[in-house]
Image: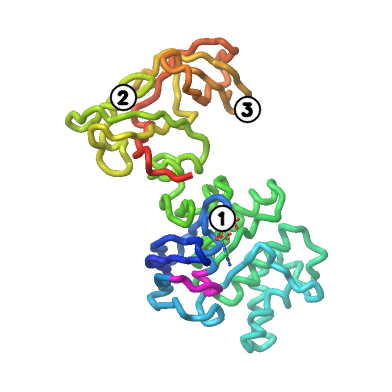
Amino acid sequence: MTAPVSVHNATKIFGAFTALDDVSLDIEAGEFIVLLGPSGCGKTTLLSILGGFQSPTKGRVVIGGKDMTSVPPAKRPTTTMFQDYALFPHMKLRDNVGFGLRMRGMAKAERDEKALGFLDLVGLKTSADKKPHELSGGQRQRVALARALAVDPDVLLLDEPLGALDLKLRRQMQDELKAIQKRVGTTFVHVTHDQEEAMAIADRIVVMNQGRIEDFGPPADIYMRPRSVFSAGFMGEVNFIPGTVKHRVDASALVDTSVGDIALPLKSFTVGAPSPGQKVTLCIRPEHFRRAGEAEGPVVSLGDATITGSAFFGTHYRCHLKPSSAPDLSIVAHMPQSADVADGQILPLAVNLADIVALPAQSGRS
Ligand SMILES: Nc1ncnc2c1ncn2[C@@H]1O[C@H](COP(=O)(O)OP(=O)(O)OP(=O)(O)O)[C@@H](O)[C@H]1O
């Protein structure tokens, strides 16, 4: 089963501290949603409010079209899978997975068949008679997932479920989690502070900061067209160039920056139309810089820049550069494996206009 989820103006206050600040969110049935943000931004508080473990101070939670704001966890169509997913050590896997069904009074033969089906889903059917201590960390995690899905929730809430796994296993489990979610079609809401994990698994990512939603959309949209300075900086490396809007001409706006005036199309401004005098922050990803002359399409020249350091990353060099016109600005740019990136080398830097995003300078809170 699966269900849509809506949060309407949820606020959570602990004493004098606002952990969630007027959060609204609409999740479609069957979506894989990731709540992403730094420690303390309110991800777990929001998940707990969805699961019924905490009540919002203000606001409402609607699941499957029904108001669940005051409904206790056991009566909600949700299951929560915590990072510490403690399996019962003395029980075989089939009994661990069938435990929730037993609690609901399902007869042994039926629950055993269902448990085996879910063990099959996570690739562990042949281990049904093993006990948790005979499994690897990743396998135990898969049993916990099978156990959570066996009770057939409409919405599965996952609180950093991969947090305890080492990096390699974590990446592997991300792929598996995504594949299993697509197979079962249950709405998943998954908490992480790992940006790569969010990009690997989410249909849509909710970027949170200081109790508020900064951005919400598919991974590529958030990466390519962030809606706040915080979101741009949290979703991978980015260069920020401060500027001031001089004036608008037809479908573009002229922005005064330390690397020269840049005429940006209005669609580069992801949050509303720019106005003269407005302070903006231009965001450019390191992989979007080019050597002038090598860029295609409408291009902005940023003048010469001197390489002050570089490191080889297999697919590219990651270089630090200082523009001649703005020695106080430090730029990180990726250059191809074939590039000459010796320290002191001068590069004529350029960037495609389409790869610049302009945001109101005050939109980010760090
Ligand atoms: N019961 C509580 N009493 C007081 N403050 C709380 C309580 N629960 C959470 N907080 C505070 O609310 C803020 C948000 O906490 P929350 O656990 O939602 O953050 P998070 O984004 O999940 O962080 P992490 O990634 O570290 O788990 C934190 O500053 C936390 O200290």
Q: Residue furthest front?
A: 16
Give yes or no for residue 87 being in the magenta stretch: no
Q: Which residue position holds label 3?
A: 314
Q: Amino acid at mark 2?
A: Asp
Q: Earlier in the sequence, mark 1 or mark 2?
A: 1
Q: Assign ligand 1 to one image quadrant.
A: bottom right
User: What separation in Å lies between label 2 and label 3 (alpha carbons)?
Assistant: 36 Å
Front-most of residues 116 and 304? 304
Q: Amino acid at mark 1?
A: Gly
Who is closer to the viewer here, 366 or 103?
366
Q: Is residue 235 left or right of residue 125?
A: left
Q: Secondary structure at mark 3?
A: loop
10 Å neighbourhood of mark 2: few (<14), some, or many (≥20)? some
Question: Distance between the Cα atoms at labels 1 and 3?
Answer: 34 Å
Residue in the image at 24% along x and 30% along y: 253
Amino acid type shown at disc 3: Gly
**Percent x, y for residue 334?**
52, 25
Q: For numbered disc 2, what is the local secondary structure?
A: strand
Q: Tell me: 130 left or right of 171.
A: right
Specify whether residue 343 is in view.
yes
Q: What stretch of residues is rendered in magenta?
A: 49-57
Q: Is 56 part of what is drawn in magenta?
A: yes
Q: Quadrant of residue 307?
A: top right
Q: Is mark 1 within 8 Å of ligand 1?
A: yes
Q: Position of residue 265 (x, y in %)?
A: 27, 32
Secondary structure mostly taken by the magenta-highlighted segment of the chain: loop
Name the N-terminal-most of marks 1 and 3: 1
The dot on residue 40 is 1
Residue 82 percent location from the top left of the image = 63, 65
